[in-house]
Image (cartoon, rainbow, N blue to C red):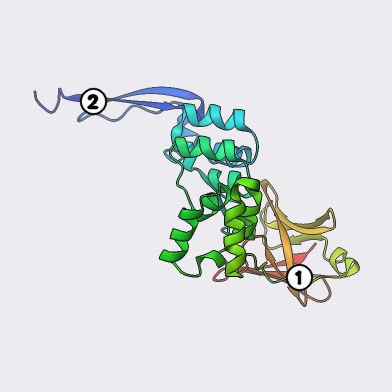
């Protein structure tokens, strides 16, 4: 068959986009235009970021939604969300740090990758010991949001009691990230809008909810708690390498990510 007559069919079930497309291309001719629903999905062929955010969030406690998603699209069992500044969390991470074993089991069945954190929560003492034997000191590594390995084990309840006792013996699996208190008046004085550019979304919002200082950007539902390390310097939850410093007069904040530096002035 000549190349001018050869053709192929590519069928993609784009369930994350809510569409199905049949795309036919004939060699030597322009490819047909994709349907608008696919053209407008900037992330394709990556998974829909809105769906990833939803499923990682649901993996904390919505078994029915997670089951529906991974049975339809098994690759979502490995989905991972950056909640801000590199605070990555997979679906399995989410289930592990809240102690949700049914969701963790469901995700593992559908291909989620086990970690020392999921093993600790599920009471898999031999796996935890093997991780630590292979990489001494790994018990000091923090999970998503800066949650310790010991906290994951405690979330596992009675089934993980042996892991808890083992980690107690190591003595360094539950060291919190460094922080210091801040006076409520000093904290509240930092609340406001900080502009760093001319665009309509070029600003950060700093607020207080439940007595905790938070940091957010418009149209990005990833509000991060700010952990105070002293002298009005903070880091966002789970990422101590990032520094967010406020001037003493509260009129300016500087973010060091650390290679990217952004300065915002209070509106």
| Left or right of residue 37: residue 148 | right
| Left or right of residue 16: residue 1 | left
Q: Secondary structure at mark 2?
A: strand
- The image shows residue 183, relative to residue 154, as above or below, that is below
Q: Where residue 266 sits: x, y (%)?
A: 79, 65
- The image shows residue 202, relative to residue 49, as above or below, that is below
Q: Which residue is mark 2?
A: 8
How far is mark 1 from mark 2, CA to CA?
A: 58 Å
From the viewer's side, name the closer residue of 84 and 92.
Answer: 92
Q: Where residue 138 sits: x, y (%)?
A: 50, 66
Q: Which residue is mark 1?
A: 252
Q: Residues within 10 Å of mark 2 (few under 14, many from 20)?
A: few
- The image shows residue 197, relative to residue 246, as above or below, that is above
Q: Who's the residue at 16% across and 24% down the image?
A: 6
Q: Where residue 195 sits: x, y (%)?
A: 73, 61
Tell me the quadrant of the picture where the C terminus can be found.
bottom right
Q: Who's the residue at 20% across and 24% down the image?
A: 7
- The image shows residue 56, relative to residue 181, as above or below, that is above
From the viewer's side, name the closer residue of 167 and 265.
Answer: 167
From the viewer's side, name the closer residue of 160 and 182.
Answer: 160
From the viewer's side, name the closer residue of 253 and 60.
Answer: 60
Q: Where residue 92 sits: x, y (%)?
A: 54, 45
**Which of the 4 quarters of the picture holds residue 260?**
bottom right
Residue situated furthest right in the rendering: 185
Q: Secondary structure at mark 1?
A: strand
**Which of the 4 quarters of the picture holds residue 29?**
top left
Q: Who's the residue at 65% across and 49% down the image?
A: 155
| Left or right of residue 55: residue 28 | left
């Amino acid at each position: 068959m000549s190349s001018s007559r050869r053709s192929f069919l590519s069928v993609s079930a784009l369930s994350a986009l809510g569409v199905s497309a049949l795309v036919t291309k004939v060699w030597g001719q322009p490819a047909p235009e994709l349907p608008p629903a696919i053209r407008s999905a900037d992330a394709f062929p990556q998974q829909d970021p809105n769906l990833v955010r939803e499923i990682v969030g649901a993996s904390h406690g919505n078994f029915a939604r997670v089951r529906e998603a991974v049975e339809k699209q098994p690759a979502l069992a490995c989905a991972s969300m950056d909640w801000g500044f590199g605070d990555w969390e997979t679906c399995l991470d989410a289930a592990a740090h809240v102690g949700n074993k049914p969701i963790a089991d469901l995700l593992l069945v559908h291909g989620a990758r086990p970690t020392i954190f999921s093993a600790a929560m599920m009471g898999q003492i031999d796996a935890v010991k093997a991780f630590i034997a292979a990489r001494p000191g790994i018990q000091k590594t923090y999970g998503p949001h800066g949650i310790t390995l010991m906290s994951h084990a405690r979330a596992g309840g009675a089934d993980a009691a042996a892991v808890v006792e083992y980690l107690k013996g190591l003595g360094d699996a539950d060291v919190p990230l460094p922080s210091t208190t801040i006076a409520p008046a000093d904290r509240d004085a930092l609340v406001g809008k900080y502009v760093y550019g001319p665009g309509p979304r070029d600003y950060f919002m700093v607020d207080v909810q439940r007595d905790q200082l938070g940091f957010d950007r418009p149209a990005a539902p990833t509000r991060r708690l700010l952990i105070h390390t002293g002298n009005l310097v903070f880091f966002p939850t789970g990422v101590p390498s990032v520094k967010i410093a406020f001037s003493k007069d509260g009129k300016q904040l500087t973010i060091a990510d650390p290679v990217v530096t952004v300065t915002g002035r209070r509106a």
